[in-house]
Every structure is written in C-alpha cells, then in structure tokens.
C-alpha cells in the first residue's frame, strides 16, 4: 500500500498558468509539469516562484485559482476527478489575486447600535444609529457632520446623489415613522462635527420606516415600512410640475429652527402582507422590495403594478440587485442562507445560488458595483463574508465585530464598512476585487 502512496505522490500533470492581471503579475505561459496533489497553497508557491524568476524584487503573495471558470477548493486531482476533467491534456489554470482585506482600521465608535451605512460616496461614509443621529465620517475616524432631528432610532440611510461635489442630499428612515432629507456640504466644516437639520420631513407611513432608496436620477426616493407599504416621494418640491407634492409649513415639537417643509407621498405601492424590510431602486422605472411576508417584488413605478413576485420561503431582511448586467437579485433573512435569483430565466422561482456559511440570520447583502461575481453578506453571527459566484465557499470572512452585524457596504471599491450591535463601524481595506 505504501508503494501505491508514493506512486500517487509522484503523479504529475502538465499545466499552463494564465491570468488577466497586468504586469508584473504575468507569469510565463509555457506548460510545466506539476504534482497533481497540489492545493491552492502549492499552486500559489509555484506562481510566485515563476514571477520571482522574471523579477528578483518580487514579493510573494497569495493567489486563487480557477479551472474552467470555477475556483479550486480541493487538491488538483480531487478537482479533476469531481469535474470529470482529463489529466492527460494540458490544464489551463487561471490565477487571480486573493479577495481578502489586507488592512483593518480603527473602528468608528458610536453611542448606540450602528444600524445603517452607505459607502457609495468615496469622500465619506454615512451611518445611521439607534441614538437617532445620522453621522458623516471622513477617513481617519473624523465625524464631520451630525444629522439631528429624528425622535427614534435610524433604520436606513441613503446618499441620494453621491456624484455631486457640493450639496450632497441624504435620506434617512426611522422608527419615528418619518423619512428625512438632508443637504450636506462635502467640504470639511471648520468646527466639526457640524450639526445639520433636515430640509424636508416626509410623513405618510403609520409605522416604523425600515428602508429607503433613491431613484438613479436622484429626483425621487422610496421608503418601505412596517405598515406593509412602499411610499414614493418627490425630492425637489420647488419644481413647478403641477401640484405633485403639497408642502405645508409645520411647527415640529422641540424644534428650535424655523419650520420645515413637509412632503406628502406621491403614490403608495400596496401588495406586501407584512413589513417591507428592504427597497432598492436600480433602474429609473422599476424598483424592488423584500418583505417579512417571504416575497421579493419588482414594481413598475408609473403604474404601481408588481412585475415580479418571487417567493423565498423565509422572512427577508435585505435585498440588493447587481451582478451580471445588474440583473441578479440577492436576498437574505431569517435563516443563514444568502440566496441569489436570476429573474431573466423564465419560470424560475428557485435561486440559482445559495451560500450557507453563516450560522445565523442575514442582515445585509450588497453586490460590488464593478464586478459580475462579487458580493458581501453580513449576519447576526457577527461576521461579514465576501463571496464570488464561482465558488460555494466564502473568499474571506471578516470577524471584527463582537456582536450582531446589522449593516454592511462596499466603500471606494476596495473596502468594506460594517456596523453592529457593538456600536462600532468597522473598516477593512485593500481588497483586490477584479
């Protein structure tokens, strides 16, 4: 038997290493004989030695490997056997940078649970907290603005126009049953943190507002609530297009400032049977919602009709649309499984991917905006996981929180920000997403 083992160890296969990475990451593509029992670590060692041969200053780093578009997560011979690939032909192995944070930053401390985060603007991070305040953070832990006015915990935040240099509009949703709009000058105030009051308060829900999202053009926002409805709101009430929004001056109790404009909902989308926990608005004319009633719906904004009704079988907490052609739906909720659907496939109510490495409910999921394959998830198990559709295992598990993670987002393309019950916003950076 021992002799067989030695023969097995000696078995070699012809392989060629290829990559889409730019120099200095390109190794020679000539085929070489490599042991068939290598795993990722051994393959990484070979690629690093090939790169070092052509560049004496090369510093070794970890790589990941794909064969036929699928990540190798076992030894080569096990992989070839499992996939029915012949070991006789030259094997083409693609290598990519490992997707994992190389740097962790000092957490940004809050006074209560960090329940919401938006990383869509590269200049700052917007957070929402159970103390009722929104906060704008610059790098290095500096809180530059505090959004004051909500009378209950903030449940969701959204940067309406992240590309605008001055006068950035932000929306927040709260258990106080309101949505509020704020305008923040991105330039650093001289006395920070600057206190900001809302320029508009949207009243219309009769229960906690759980989620808020902006139309891509930035003209409207939508909000989802415990009252089972989704309200659509106009942002700029100075537009003279008929009386779409009636605004009235109103004194708000405990308000020292001048009275605020109050907006009324343009329209209400009705159909969910329970709390609307998450809304996203990826295209001008259609938005998506997820609910505790186990359904994901796509709505036609003009007609108010639902175009798609997916049944997930679980109460849902989070939803995001992205991936290939920005058309895959990811959602998570009251079990540990992150599910992904492709609504373009006719008659498919079954998810095309299910990722099950968390061990508690999922609180957040977010596609990377520059990749077809990458997304993140956050969970009550205290972990944030980074996923690639080409493998069933997480690429990376970020364990910086001491309690439930409530929210997470990508920031600046190479960082992940996450907030939780430990009152911290954690930042992990230098993640290579290709």
Image: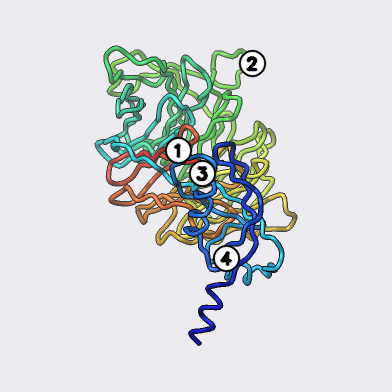
Q: Does residue 89 lie above or below 215 as drawn?
A: below
Q: Which residue is mark 2?
A: 241
Residue at the spot 38% in from the left edge and 52% down from the top edge: 383
Q: Earlier in the sequence, mark 1 or mark 3?
A: 1
Q: Mark 2 or mark 4, which is nearer to you?
A: 4
Circle 1 crowding by C-alpha within 10 Å: few under 14, some 14–19, many from 20: few
Residue at the spot 67% in from the left edge and 68% down from the top edge: 87
Under tag 3, what secondary structure?
strand
Q: CA distance from mark 1 to mark 3?
A: 37 Å
Query: Which picture quadrant has residue 422?
Result: top left
Q: Does residue 253 lie above or below 189 as drawn?
A: below
Q: Earlier in the sequence, mark 3 or mark 2?
A: 2
Q: Earlier in the sequence, mark 4 or mark 3?
A: 4
Residue at the spot 45% in from the left edge and 30% down from the top edge: 203
Q: Which residue is mark 1?
A: 57
Residue 12 as seen in the image, left or right of residue 90: left
Res. 263 in view = yes
Residue 140 as seen in the image, left or right of residue 47: left
Q: Which residue is mark 3?
A: 366
Residue 162 as seen in the image, left or right of residue 13: left
Query: Which picture quadrant has residue 36?
Result: bottom right
Residue extending furthest toward the right: 346
Under tag 2, what secondary structure?
loop
Q: Mark 1 or mark 4, which is nearer to you?
A: 1
- Is 210 or 4 nearer to us in this picture? 4
Residue 432, percent across and down?
A: 49, 41
Q: CA distance from mark 3 to mark 2?
A: 35 Å
Circle 3 crowding by C-alpha within 10 Å: few under 14, some 14–19, many from 20: many
Quadrant containing the C terminus in the rendered view: top right
């Amino acid at each position: 038997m021992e002799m067989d083992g030695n023969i097995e160890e000696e078995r070699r296969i012809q392989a060629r290493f290829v990559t889409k990475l730019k120099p200095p990451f390109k190794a020679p593509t000539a085929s070489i004989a490599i042991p068939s029992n290598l795993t990722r670590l051994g393959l990484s060692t070979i690629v690093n030695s090939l790169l070092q041969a052509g560049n004496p200053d090369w510093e070794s780093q970890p790589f990941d490997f794909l064969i036929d578009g699928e990540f190798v997560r076992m030894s080569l011979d096990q992989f070839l056997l499992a996939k029915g690939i012949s070991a006789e032909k030259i094997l083409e192995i693609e290598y990519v940078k490992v997707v994992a944070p190389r740097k962790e930053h000092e957490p940004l401390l809050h006074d209560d649970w960090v329940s919401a985060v938006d990383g869509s603007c590269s200049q700052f991070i917007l957070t929402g907290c159970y103390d009722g305040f929104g906060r704008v953070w610059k790098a290095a832990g500096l809180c530059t603005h505090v959004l004051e006015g909500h009378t209950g915990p903030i449940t969701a935040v959204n940067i309406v126009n992240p590309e605008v240099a001055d006068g950035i509009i932000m929306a927040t949703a709260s258990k106080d049953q309101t949505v509020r709009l704020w305008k923040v000058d991105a330039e650093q105030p001289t006395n920070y943190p600057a206190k900001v009051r809302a320029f508009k308060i949207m009243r219309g829900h009769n229960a906690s507002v759980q989620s808020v999202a902006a139309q891509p053009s930035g003209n409207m926002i939508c909000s989802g609530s415990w009252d089972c409805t989704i309200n659509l709101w106009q942002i700029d009430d100075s537009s003279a297009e008929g009386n779409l929004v009636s605004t009235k001056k109103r004194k708000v109790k405990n308000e020292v400032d001048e009275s605020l404009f109050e907006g009324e909902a343009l329209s209400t989308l009705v159909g969910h049977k329970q709390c609307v926990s998450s809304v996203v608005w990826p295209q001008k004319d259609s938005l998506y919602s997820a609910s505790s009633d186990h359904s994901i719906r796509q709505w036609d904004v003009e007609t108010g009709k639902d175009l798609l009704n997916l049944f997930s079988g679980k109460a849902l907490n989070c939803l995001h649309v992205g991936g290939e052609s920005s058309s895959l739906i990811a959602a998570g909720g009251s079990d540990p499984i992150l599910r992904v659907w492709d609504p373009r496939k006719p008659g498919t109510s079954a998810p095309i991917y299910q990722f099950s490495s968390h061990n508690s409910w999922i609180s957040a999921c977010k596609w990377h905006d520059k990749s077809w394959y990458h997304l993140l998830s956050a969970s009550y198990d205290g972990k944030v996981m980074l996923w690639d559709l080409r493998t069933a295992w997480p690429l990376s598990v970020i364990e910086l929180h001491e309690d439930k993670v409530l929210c997470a987002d990508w920031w600046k393309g190479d960082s992940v920000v996450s907030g939780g019950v430990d009152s911290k916003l954690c930042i992990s950076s230098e993640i290579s997403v290709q």
